[in-house]
Amino acid sequence: MKILASLLLLLASLMPAQALETITVRFPRPQPQPACSTQAILVDNQGTLATVYSFGVEPDKGQTEVGGKMIDLELIAHDPVSRLTLLRLPESSGIKLELASIGSSQNLSTADGLRAAGELARFAGTEKLFHGQLLPLALLRFNYQAKGVRPGEPILNAAGEVVALALEGRIGEGNTGYALPIEVYHRVARGKIVNQQIQRCWLGVIMDAENTIPSLVGLRPDSPASKAGMQRDDILVSIAGRPINEYADAVNAFFYLRSGQKALVKVLRGTELLELEVIPEIVPTAQLGE
């Protein structure tokens, strides 16, 4: 009996979670184009919704339908790089949503039991390039049981935690699509906001994208990296716990840096492994716009 009970518990832990309740958000487009529709999840008890928006729409024009009437959603912040957007649902809307449980995408494997919109989803890997072009952050690729999901749809692990948000429901006519790691939500929610837009950070390192070794070819004067003691020819090993094996890994790690928050950077200098504490700053061009 004990063996049977243990087996049942194991099977229950492997069962993929059901769909998380979402709300449809519409971003209007100029006529006669149809509105852009995405799904949003509730991420806190203050009515904050997390969703994505499409290129060509204004993230501050989000609306949702209540009782046949469209109501405006307040824009908290958006990130033009990842397109993740945080909106606030008015208390007067009367809408009650299930609060999302936020997990992690860091250790996803192809063996994980995942669901999106109640359908089976399979983690298919990480994408750093799109049509040969380097992405500003690494995306997750999923294969869906059905022919894709809607943008903004949460992808859940077996515990019912959100590990990703669908960015593109599918690629072409197949059942494969891209998603944002849920860590992007943390980056946007905790980042510095100027004019409702998340500000990018920098370290001030110069790298050669064609070099197979992630080494520094230079540093910007008076930059966070130079202040921390980083030097030309240092080889990046990790940034804030994210392993760096190539240039694309460094670009991805830079995306998650937050201004004023110390980041441990490991570099190989000759044969010596060094740990340097760097304090990222807002990109100077962004500061000029404040």
Image: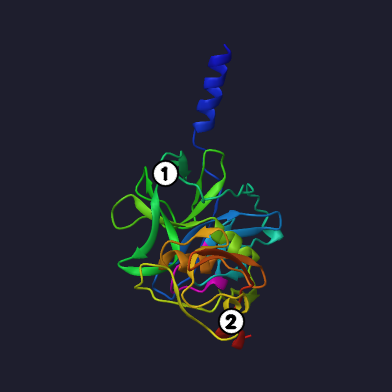
Disc on res. 213: none
Within 10 Å of disc 2 (Cα), the crowding (few <14, some 14-19, many 20+) is some
Could you tell me which secondary element the residue under label 2 belongs to? loop
Q: Tell me the chief SS of the magenta region.
A: loop
Q: Identity of the amino acid at label 1?
A: Ala
Q: Position of residue 224 (x, y in %)?
A: 60, 78
Q: Residue at x 30, y 66 (%)?
A: 131
Q: Is residue 54 magenta?
A: yes
Left or right? Give the position of 36 relative to 68.
Answer: left
Q: Is residue 224 above or below residue 141?
A: below
Q: Position of residue 121 (x, y in %)?
A: 42, 44
Callout in the foreground (1, 2): 2
Q: Identity of the amino acid at label 2?
A: Ser
Asked whether the beta carbons under mark 1 and mark 2 sit within 8 Å of each other, the answer is: no
Q: Residue at x 62, y 75 (%)?
A: 228
Residue 71, visible in the rendered structure: no
Q: Residue at x 39, y 51 (%)?
A: 125
Q: Is residue 210 above or below residue 237?
A: below
Q: Is residue 22 magenta?
A: no
Q: Is residue 224 above or below residue 154?
A: below
Q: Earlier in the sequence, mark 1 or mark 2?
A: 1
Q: Is residue 80 above or below residue 9?
A: below
Give the quarter of the image for residue 229.
bottom right
Marks 1 and 2, how far apart at CA:
43 Å
Give the quarter of the image for residue 223.
bottom right
Mark 2 highlights which residue? 223
Which is more toward the observer, 2 or 60?
2
Region rendered in magenta: 52-61
Which quarter shows the C terminus?
A: bottom right
Disc on res. 121: 1
Could you tell me which secondary element the residue under label 1 belongs to? strand
Which quarter shows the N terminus?
A: top right
